[in-house]
Image (cartoon, grey):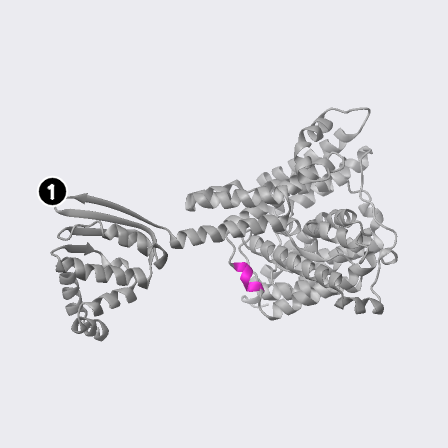
Amino acid sequence: MTTETAPVRAGLFDKLRHDFLSSIVVFLVALPLCMGIAIASDVPIAAGIITGIIGGIIVGTFSGSPMQVSGPAAGLTVIIYDIVHNEALGLGALGIIVLAAGLMQVVAGILRLGQWFRAVSPAVIQGMLAGIGVIIFSSQIHIMVDDQPRDNTLNNIKSIPAAIEKGIFPIDWSVHHQAAYLGLITILIIVLWQIGAPKKLKALPAALIAVTAATAIAYFTDLEILKITLPGNLMDSLSLPGVEQFKHLTEQPYIIAALTIAIIASAETLLCANAVDQLHTGPRTKYDKELAAQGIGNAICGLFGALPMTGVIVRSSANIEAGAKTRLSAILHGVWLLVFVSFLASVLSHVPKSTLAAILVYTGYKLVNIKAVKRIWKDSPSEVIIYLATLVTIVGFDLLTGVVVGVILAVLKLVYTISHLSVKFEDDPDANRAVMHLRGAATFVSLPKLAQALDRVPPNRELQVFLDHLDYVDHACLTMLMDWEKQHISTGGRLLMDWDELHPRFMRQRLNANGDELFRASETGDRARLNGEEMETTHE
């Protein structure tokens, strides 16, 4: 082995070790999610597990977002539930609808439509992460005490004190407190491992250590708490689409359902990919490739009659927290799903649900990133309004509505920013001098406001205009300023303004307006002459 190849192989081995260990953590997180989302969608549990397997192995292989992990998503549960209980559709129609939605996503990826999702405000992304974090935290804290989540997020939040009470004080000989203590031990192990793990063992994911320890505690103490349960045979419970189903693709209910899934799944996936990029420093997402990969995965899910998939922030953030380095972690998590549900389901039956719920409670807490909110406030306090609106709407309604509200507010803020001009005018008649401060953007929209302020300047007054807070000036406002300057000079006034603050092409336009000879000097590079005459023009 040469000295050059030794570090390369060592680095590769280190990545493989991290990915292997991370994949186990993601698998342990993904399995209950696959099952829970299937139950919430009122479809066989197998439909959720199959989607998790395909999302890991297939989408993980072709993914354009290496750190993102795909699987059945909570954001689609309401849509799937409506399809299953729709008289014109039903469970038998789910497969062909998901297949059609996947093909739409593939076409969208080929047409490079995924790039549009890159232009999303950071406040919307952080609001989305925080909203998902609140939803996860408020629902999983009930499962952590071996209780059932409520029917919606708001009720989950309202009943958190009751869940805490159940976890502390046993009621009617219940064992909620046992599950709660095991969940707290799980979180405590995660925190302590992240803080004080030995350097040589730091590569082991904290969540994996916590799950292993909590499972051992539950096993050897024989706690009467809920464990993971799996179906006996996956394929027997699935509703595979038949050839006759394809003829329904021209019917309106099928088209609308497929288009709805394609749009929402694509939006959730690419927004999650955007958010995942902010959680790590590795390769950035290739949006069109990720969109096409999701389409391939959903098309295959449709053939198996499984649930549709998206990129899932819970699995993805757990993947990153566990130390994943490449897409191999996502692929392996799909392999572990397949292997364990096929051959080793009895091993999983020892894993307490409260332990897995505790990992999600901690993940939800981490997603509400207070430091990110402070950065947003520091950069632009108004962005915090967008953040809060996105968060509150996601919690109060759903993910898609919250993101749409956030995007609309971000667009409105942009429109306001590029059209708003603040003009502060101060006149000192005794000194025969006036001062004008421009702040914001001087565009054709704000031209009347600027013109009105200039009209207040007396004919023979010296006007000094400060541009240090002017973000942008368009051609319309620039032309008006140059025309006003000529007219003002002809009435005995003067204009003092640092034209260098403006864009260079606007500078050339003004020089041209003050004489062809000066314009030629700027074009030929006669900088000495240009600078001299420029100073004369500015201060005359």
| Residue 265 horizontal/vertical position (percent) | 66, 57
Q: Is residue 533 left or right of residue 156?
A: left
The quarter of the displayed image where residue 358 is located: top right
User: Closer to the camera, 354 or 405?
Assistant: 405
Type of secondary structure dominating the magenta stretch:
helix
Residue where numbered disc 1 is placed? 430
Q: Residues within 10 Å of mark 1 (few under 14, many from 20)?
A: few
Q: Which residues are magenta?
A: 114-118
What is the secondary structure assignment of the residue under circle 1?
loop
Q: Is residue 284 visible?
A: no
| Residue 346 horizontal/vertical position (percent) | 85, 47
| Residue 513 horizontal/vertical position (percent) | 21, 68
Q: Look at the image and say whether residue 405 sits in the magenta stretch.
A: no
Q: In percent of the image, x 37 and y 56: which residue is there?
A: 445
Q: Quadrant of the N terminus?
A: bottom right
In the depicted structure, whether residue 64 falls above or below residue 434 = below
| Residue 110 horizontal/vertical position (percent) | 61, 70
Q: Quadrant of the C terminus?
A: bottom left
The quarter of the displayed image where residue 229 is located: top right
